[in-house]
Amino acid sequence: MNNSSSFDIEIPARAKYLSLVRSLVEEAAETKTSLSRTQVEDFKVAVSEATTNAIEAHARASSDETIKIRCTVDSERVEFRIADKGCGFYPDQIQPLPEPDDPDRLTFERGLGIYLMKVLADEVEIQSNKNGTEVTLVIQVGKSNTAVTE
């Protein structure tokens, strides 16, 4: 990345810290980029979903460790990496859900997090093993994500 800046934070695995993470996304995206308001809002949702999943992974693993977040920003992209110390999972083994307009979808109260990340971010990478999961989300400046509006 050219002329990039980055910062690292660690947050307790508690839902009350999600608003802090959303604020960090907004500040990072608006400080050094020309992302549209819609792109920033979409990216906040994607990062919130990844962070929520990390918080829930810590709860399932009864882990008191912090969640590590790294943000890297330059004039072309914003990248957030969210790393937890949960039990991990296999992303390719996630059971597909019915399409959002399928009436059977109403029987599922959860399970849209990874789907939303993939729709709202330009790049999504998930690395997971028994020691935890790291999710990398990227939004590129100048690229309009039209998947939501189609």
Image: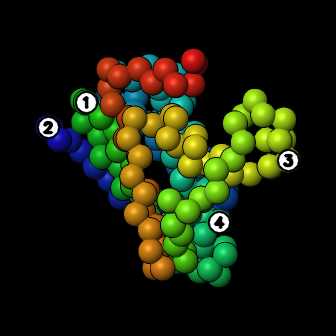
Is tag 2's residue or tag 1's residue first in the polypeptide sequence? 2
Q: Is residue 114 above or below residue 85?
A: above
- Give left or right: position of 39 versus 73: right
Q: Going 57% across and 25% down the picture, which residue do you hit?
A: 148
Q: Going 51% across and 34% down the picture, which residue do you hit?
A: 120
In terms of depth relative to the viewer, which is nearer, 104 or 148? 104
Amino acid type indicated by mark 3 = Thr
The residue that disc 1 covers is 76
Is tag 2's residue or tag 4's residue first in the polypeptide sequence? 2
**Contact? badges 2 and 4 (CB < 8 Å):** no
Amino acid type indicated by mark 4 = Glu
The residue that disc 3 covers is 107
Q: Nearer the viewer, mark 3 or mark 2?
A: 3
Amino acid type indicated by mark 2 = Asn
Badge 1 marks a residue whose secondary structure is loop
Residue 133: tell me if it is visible: yes
The residue that disc 4 covers is 56
Q: Position of residue 110 (x, y in %)?
A: 74, 51
Is tag 3's residue or tag 4's residue first in the polypeptide sequence? 4
Q: Position of residue 49 (x, y in %)?
A: 59, 49
